[in-house]
Every structure is written in C-alpha cells, then in structure tokens.
Image (spheres, grey):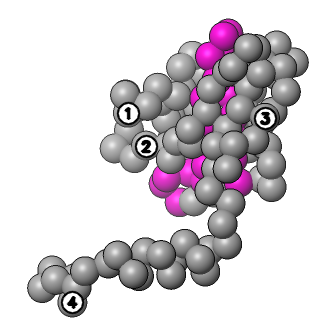
C-alpha cells in the first residue's frame, strides 16, 4: 500500500527518519529519496539511530556501512529496500502492510517442495 510522507523539502537532509509503524527508514539526499526496512542486514538491529556518511548508512550498533544506492552494495549484506519515490514534490513509500499470517499463507500456497528444501 502506498503512503504519502508529505513534502520532500520538509524531510531533513541526510538523516535516518523512521516512518509509519517504525518498520521503514527513509533518507532524503537532495531531490532523491531512499527507503529501506528498519533492520540491519548483519544482526537485525534497528537502523533508525544510524547516520548517513556520503552515500552510505552507517549502522550505529556495528559500524557497518550499507550503500543507499540499490545498484551498489558496500558490504556483502545489503539494505532491504522499500519502493519509494517523489510525485509533484510529495515523497511516498509503498509497503506491504498485510498481516504476517496472510503473507505466510500466500507464500505457502505458492511454495513447491523440492529435494533441496526437505
């Protein structure tokens, strides 16, 4: 589901901002917006109190650097990006807000058992 965050220019520059129910962090870099899950790929610590260094987020718990550009990865682990964008100056994110039980049920219907995952 798509959620509007308000005017892009009202978002602080180069800060990790928690939005919604706390599961997503957004970072504004000039006229660009980056959104990712509020979970460090290393040990699943929250990233909301991390900081931005150039084009990377630095995890405040482990000091690991993660690229804010989806095409580049600063370490073997990468941020779990969330669709985001800007329309007419309004920042938005698109998150799957279905209950976890519903998501797991859908996954179970499409999952195929193979020799590898037995």
Question: Quick check: marks 2 and 4 in contact, CB under 8 Å?
Answer: no
The residue mark sitting in front, 2 or 4, is: 4
The residue closer to the viewer here, 58 or 92, is 92
Mark toward the start of the polypeptide (2 vs 1): 1
Residue 88: x %, y % from top left: 73, 14
Per the model, the C-alpha gap separating discs 4 and 3 is 42 Å
Crowding near pointer 1: few (<14 within 10 Å), some, many (20+)?
Answer: some
Relative height, residue 32 to residue 68 (above, below) = above
Q: Secondary structure at mark 1?
A: loop
Q: Secondary structure at mark 3?
A: strand
Residue 41: x %, y % from top left: 49, 52
> Which residue sits at x=62%, y=16%?
32
The quadrant holding residue 70 is top left
> Which residue sits at x=80%, y=49%?
20
* Relative side of 57 to 2, left or right: left
The range drawn in magenta is 23-43
* Relative side of 58 to 118, left or right: right
Per the model, the C-alpha gap separating discs 2 and 1 is 6 Å
The residue mark sitting in front, 1 or 4, is: 4
């Amino acid at each position: 589901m798509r959620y509007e965050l308000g005017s892009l220019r009202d978002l602080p520059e180069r800060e990790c901002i928690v939005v919604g129910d706390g599961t997503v962090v957004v970072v504004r870099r000039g006229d660009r917006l980056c959104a990712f899950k509020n979970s460090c790929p290393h040990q699943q610590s929250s990233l909301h109190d991390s900081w931005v260094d150039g084009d990377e987020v630095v995890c405040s718990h482990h000091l690991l650097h993660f690229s804010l550009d989806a095409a580049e990865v600063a370490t073997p682990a990468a941020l779990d990006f969330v669709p985001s964008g800007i329309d007419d100056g309004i920042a938005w994110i698109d998150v799957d807000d279905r209950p976890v039980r519903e998501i797991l049920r859908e996954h179970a219907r499409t999952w195929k058992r193979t020799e590898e995952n037995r």
